[in-house]
Image (cartoon, grey):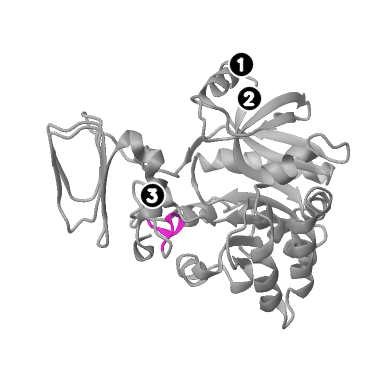
Amino acid sequence: MSDHRYAMIMAGGSGTRLWPLSRKDLPKQLIPLFRSPGEERARSLLEIAADRLEGLIPAERRYICAGERYREQIKAALPGFADPQILGEPEGRDTVNAVGFGAAILNKLDQDAVFCVLTADHIIDPPEAFRRAVETGFRLIDQDWYRFVSFAIAPTYPATGFGYIEHGEPFNAFPDAFKVKRFVEKPDLKRATEYVRSGLFSWNSGMFVFHSGAFMKALKKFKPESYEGLKKIADAWGTPDQERVLSEIYPKLPKTSVDYAVMEPASSDDEFSICGVSMPVRWLDVGSWPSYAETLPADDQGNRVSGNVTLTDSRGNLVVGPDDHTIALLGCDNLVVVHTPKATLVMPRERAQDLKLLHAELDEELQ
């Protein structure tokens, strides 16, 4: 059965809340931002996500779903990925179509394909715990192809930016697995606090395991317009019509999330069984400057810096810049300062979630 295991990394999104470092022509998942102790060079989130699969999925059965415009950048960062392993989206159509794209193509290549859906937005540590959880997800589906597996993260605070999973009965044969009672969309602070206090909820990591054929069946049932379009794309895959059909159909697929379009309705449908697997890891969604700050060490004044930075009488700041450009702060508290050759950002840390508002006002060439 392990010969039919695959992985697909979703690497879409423009990372607007990490502007100006992340831009349309160089999104956050492709920027070499992270260097572990002892490493000679920094790695990107996409490289880290691919490395996490070592020992779990063979290189030839790993796929990436990302914008077609980033194909050459992905190949440069990950030379082990051949062209057919990069599923290029003509434009982003949200996660249900990204997952469906992978399911449709993999099911055409291998009707027994079971694939884990991973993200290129996260720092996950330790990788061994990640791999054990994914292995459990594969084993659950080996027993029943109509199980859909979602990976659950123990919440450390009442986050309002993540969806939640309510735990149901445990699986006796799999100590870290449980039946999912329901999925909850991003709650307000009051409900998030109640969920965390109850001990019955986990964060929804946005990572899954599916049997490709079972996912397509669910898509046909719950999102038929996406199913019909993706089926036509798969039928044309590997033929001279591949690019024409993809470019004509994919941009017209209705945008929505895989949680809303498939996981939520499947959780109340007798044909499918929704399982959760707890993933005991440090899980950091690097989607904003405050979350990126958590990847950097803090000084005794709570400042976190990357680059050539001098701070005097300053506290709680995040400062990011190149090594060949000095950034100096005097008497500044709780700021985010990011300098790039094209643009410089200065904002209070508490306004970080509003960065999309500023981004929308920028000239196209700066976005």
Badge number at residue 70: none
Label 3: which residue?
Answer: 18
Q: Is residue 33 visible?
A: no
Badge number at residue 201: 2
Q: Position of residue 285 (x, y in %)?
A: 48, 41
Q: Residues within 10 Å of mark 1 (few under 14, many from 20)?
A: few
Label 1: which residue?
Answer: 198
Q: Is residue 364 visible?
A: yes
Q: Tell me which residue sits at (47%, 56%) in the image.
A: 14
Q: Is residue 332 left or right of residue 28?
A: left
Q: Earlier in the sequence, mark 3 or mark 1?
A: 3
The image quadrant of residue 305 is: top left
Above or below for 121 versus 342: above
Span shown in magenta:
26-32
| Tag 3 and tag 2, C-beta contact below 8 Å | no
Above or below for 13 versus 267: below
Q: Earlier in the sequence, mark 3 or mark 2?
A: 3
